Amino acid sequence: MSKGMRKGLTSYGDPGFSLFLRRAFIKAMGFSDDALERPIIGITDTFSDYNPCHGNVPQLIEAVKRGVMLAGGLPMAFPTISIHESFSNPTSMFLRNLMAMDTEEMIRAQPMDAVVLISGCDKTVPAQLMAAASADVPTILLITGPMLVGHHKGEELGACTDCRRLWAMHRAGQMDEAEIDVVSGRLAPTNGTCMVMGTASTMACISEALGIALPGTGSIPATHADRLRAAEASGARAVAMAKSGGPKPTEILTKKAFDNALTVLQAIGGSTNGLVHLSALAGRLGIEIDFDAFDQLGRTVPTLIDLKPSGAHYMEHFHWAGGMPKLLKELGDLIDGTALTVTGEPLSAAIEKAEEVPNQTIIRSRANPLQASGAMAVLHGNLAPRGAIIKQSAASPTLMQHEGRAVVFDSVEDMTNRMDDPDLDVTADDVLVLRNAGPVGAPGMPEAGYLPIPRKLAQQGVKDMVRISDARMSGTAFGTIVLHIAPEAAIGGPLGLVRNGDRIRLDVANRSINLLVDDAELVERRKTYQPPPPHEGSERGYLSLYLKTVNQADEGCDFDFMRKVPEKN
Ligand code: FES
């Protein structure tokens, strides 16, 4: 089935010449005719000096290449952009779609019979999967893997749940400058991705549930020899996929694969970002994510994984407790084991091989869950006509039904400037509101939804408040935080009409978030509503494209023209 160098010839009007020229140029790299007749396996190189989460990519590429060559293929690594959370301005989310387009077009443009995608940091996995879904070349995903746990004064530390907790202690005056400096060198002790159940770990688990990565490989620590063996195995499997022509992403990423992924998202106490990325990925394939069904899963699927921020442990513990095959086994009939995986076998084959680890407590049984309900609930109400999300597994039970006075911040900048003002009129019972922080408003829907507790309240010992926004939050964060309010304020969503002092009611049991202001008053407010001014530089370049075409959170914040056009009957 493989076409190797003959695939996708450059257009010169003479295919024979195109192939001749291609071979002439590639021979400059010293390849033999024998090598050039082999199935070609593309390998994405997402290494960057800016991306410690991908710090092991050079070694992984070498191991994938070894696997490819042992199986008789020709590995060809090629670069794409790399996105790290802390090094992306304004946000990594702003760039996710750019990486997806870059990756898709490089897969399309260059000759390859199969591709091994290597990624791990939050936006890179969804970007590559979106690309693979659209390009539809046989694909296998290799996760870079979580970093090892950090230690400080006898305590285990995890990026970045503890980054936030310890920074909050520093803000509250409970940790001095010298100690927070020491901590900054201990939170991320190795390369690899954040080792709590943040977005990177969520996407790694979801990728296994989708069947697009080899079973059991998502949670292997970045620094372990098994990670390199997984890379070698991924390369070898890619050659088999190249030879047989599949399975392709469209054969793997089916409705039942998404149903499995959504179930896993609930069961792992996963990141809210996982839902955004799954929505974007599903949109590439013409599959609708049913948010009501997802909410229903949240009521029936228990949280089974004892990892921060919902629990106490870290990805390496999850891995040694049996990882995803064991979790899928515990989920039992909640998982559709007939879904196809990159192995060519159904998911049930991986579940049957799940390792039983005596006395492990990280992966719970359904009879003894960490929490009886799943990670997330979907909210609706007059503040969120197209929905909003709360990660209930990481929220304070005492705030799940709460009514309070709105304290409104008009932008991330406004929040930054005023949150710690000693004169800010705020109490612990208030509801902090951040708006104009959505896909268009910020732009890039930053992880600003984890509004900090105002310093004067933090110093009084307040650890959580109800906070609502059209932003996202890091999957590593903890708190009673309503996110992804859609439509966002910047495109006219009702969040823009909230005023200081309005009453807001959060009722998670009834899945509602409402502004307690009557409709007639809201109609009056809309008449005088002023949208935020245009972003600087928005008339050109990628920002212009982004602002004109980005979808809302409920559609995954993909570009509208990248979604699959529904087929006509
Ligand atoms: Fe890359 Fe957390 S910053 S995974």
Image (cartoon, rainbow, N blue to C red):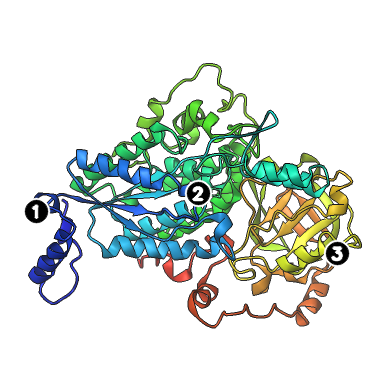
Report if residue 551 is visible in the image. yes
The residue under the point 79% across, 70% down is 519
Camera-side residue of 416 and 493: 416
Under mark 1, the amino acid is Asp
Identify the residue at image location x=22%, y=44%.
239
Q: Which residue is rendered at x = 24% and y = 43% of the image?
A: 68
Instruction: Report x, y in % for residue 504.
Output: 81, 58
Residue 18: quarter of image: bottom left
Residue flagged by tag 3: what amino acid is it?
Asp
Indicate which disc, 1 or 3, sits on the residue closer to the N terminus.
1
Q: Note whether residue 429 is visible.
A: no
Local SS, label 2:
helix
- 21 or 297, which lies in front? 21
Residue drawn at point x = 56 percent, y = 43 percent: 194
User: As shown in the figure, which amino acid type bears the numbered disc 2?
Assistant: Pro
Q: Name the residue under label 2.
A: 52
Beta carbon at label 1 within 8 Å of ligand 1: no
